[in-house]
Image: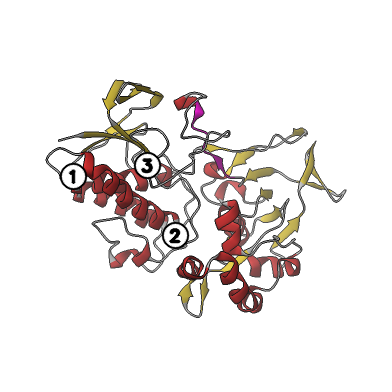
């Protein structure tokens, strides 16, 4: 049975492992943490999927009905544990990958416990790599956290909190704080797109099919009047509108619109304030680009992650762009035997993208397996 190295035991790595097993490969899954789905276990308590249960399952095992329409963080964690057990996947935990090099016909993966070699390697560490925190000028007296460090409102009661960003994490965290009575402000530097969680009773992510069938620009033109009636314009909330529609924004720029789960109502009600981008940090306060200065106790940077893989592959890997991001995801890369899974933003949900790409990778690997025509 041919060995295939898979790096990462989150949803993507588990999906890849299950699909590889199905075509007759033996996946060796390397995971630096001590459990599957480690990133999900460290997410904030109130997190829930923005995709419905039926469109979020990984290959070979659907979400149970008990997970609800939009599975919660805890439901996802329970599902990933069940998924690994169902497929008999046994990742090598505590194996932090340190470097990856191609040596002749094989990939050599050096990790904290030694090394592995295989002719095929699948990277499944995904979009949420290294947390990205802007290097703002000046100094701040209070803590500056990344969204990955936020769990719940309890430590922030009685504080003035600035949440930076306008992605789904920023909106979720700001709403979570506001619902707990915390004084919260959203700092939004650039233009945005906003989508409702559901449209005509259907999850908004289901409309990704329209984008695939009609093309993102036509899909945006058709849905623009409906979305405007449903959520209004970004300008209605003191924000600037992105120059492209939401589907085009995803397809061409790899950016995900914010899916509103209640933050817009909180902005209208004044429970979440909106401020422009940060100009500088000013001790106990923050100076914004509009010239105003306001005091805060804590800053939470919901500013995303970087997925620069050059520290692992070195500076000359043909499968990576100049920023260290994969050129191709879900298909053979320019490097023989090297695949990447779920490294591009998806309008239909990242779990769905992981499932689709994992199956595609397994199909691509299958012809090279022994005893297959």
The residue that disc 3 covers is: 332
Q: Magenta stretch: give its range.
A: 304-310
Which quadrant of the view contains residue 306?
A: top right
Name the residue rendered at 58%, 33% in the picture.
Answer: 322
Left or right of 45 on screen, residue 332: left
Left or right of 262 on screen, residue 122: left
Give yes or no for contact between labels 1 and 2 (Cβ–Cβ under 8 Å).
Answer: no
SS for dot 1: loop
Whichever of labels 2 and 3 marks the residue nearer the N terminus, that label is 2
Q: Position of residue 127 (x, y in %)?
A: 48, 44
SS for dot 2: loop
Magenta stretch contains residue 327: no
Q: Position of residue 348 (x, y in %)?
A: 46, 62
The residue that disc 1 covers is: 88
Give the distance between the C-alpha atoms of the residues marked 1 and 3, in whole angstroms. 26 Å
Whichever of labels 1 and 3 marks the residue nearer the N terminus, that label is 1
Bin the neighbour count of mark 1 within 10 Å (Cα to Cα): few under 14, some 14-19, many 20 and up: few
Give the distance between the C-alpha atoms of the residues marked 2 and 3, in whole angstroms. 29 Å
Which quadrant of the view contains residue 99?
A: top left
Which residue is more in the foreground, 181 or 137? 137
SS for dot 3: loop
Magenta stretch contains residue 305: yes
């Amino acid at each position: 049975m041919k060995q295939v190295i898979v790096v990462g035991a989150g949803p993507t790595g588990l999906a890849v492992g299950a699909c590889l097993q199905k075509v007759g490969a033996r996946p060796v899954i390397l995971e630096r943490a001590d459990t599957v789905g480690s990133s999900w276990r460290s997410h904030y308590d109130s997190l829930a999927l923005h995709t419905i249960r039926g469109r979020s399952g990984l290959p070979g095992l659907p979400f149970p009905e008990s997970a609800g329409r939009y599975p919660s963080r805890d439901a996802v964690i329970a599902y990933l544990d069940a998924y690994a057990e169902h497929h008999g996947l046994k990742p090598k935990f505590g194996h932090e990958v340190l470097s990856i090099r191609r040596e002749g016909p094989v990939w050599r993966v050096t990790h904290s416990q030694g090394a592995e070699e295989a002719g095929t390697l699948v990277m499944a560490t995904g979009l949420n790599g290294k947390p990205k925190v802007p290097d703002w000028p000046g100094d701040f007296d209070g803590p500056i956290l990344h969204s990955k460090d936020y769990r719940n409102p309890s430590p922030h009661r009685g504080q003035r909190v600035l949440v930076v960003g306008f992605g789904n994490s920023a909106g979720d965290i700001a709403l979570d704080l506001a619902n707990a009575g915390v004084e919260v402000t959203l700092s939004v530097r650039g233009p945005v797109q906003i989508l409702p969680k559901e449209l005509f009773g259907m999850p908004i992510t289901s409309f990704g099919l329209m984008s695939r069938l009609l093309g993102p620009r036509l899909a945006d033109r058709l849905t623009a009047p409906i979305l405007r009636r449903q959520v209004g314009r970004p300008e209605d909330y003191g924000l600037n509108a992105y120059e492209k529609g939401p589907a085009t924004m995803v397809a061409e720029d790899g950016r995900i619109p914010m899916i509103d789960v209640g933050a817009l109502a909180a902005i209208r009600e004044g429970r979440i304030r909106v401020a422009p981008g940060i100009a500088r940090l000013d001790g106990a306060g923050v100076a914004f680009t509009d010239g105003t200065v306001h005091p805060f106790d804590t800053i939470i940077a919901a500013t995303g992650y970087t997925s620069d893989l050059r520290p692992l592959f070195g500076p000359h890997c043909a499968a990576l762009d100049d920023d260290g991001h994969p050129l191709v995801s879900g298909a053979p890369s320019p490097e023989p035997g090297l695949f990447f899974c779920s490294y591009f933003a998806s309008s239909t949900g990242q779990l769905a993208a992981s499932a689709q790409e994992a199956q595609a990778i397994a199909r691509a690997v299958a012809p090279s397996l022994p005893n297959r025509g």
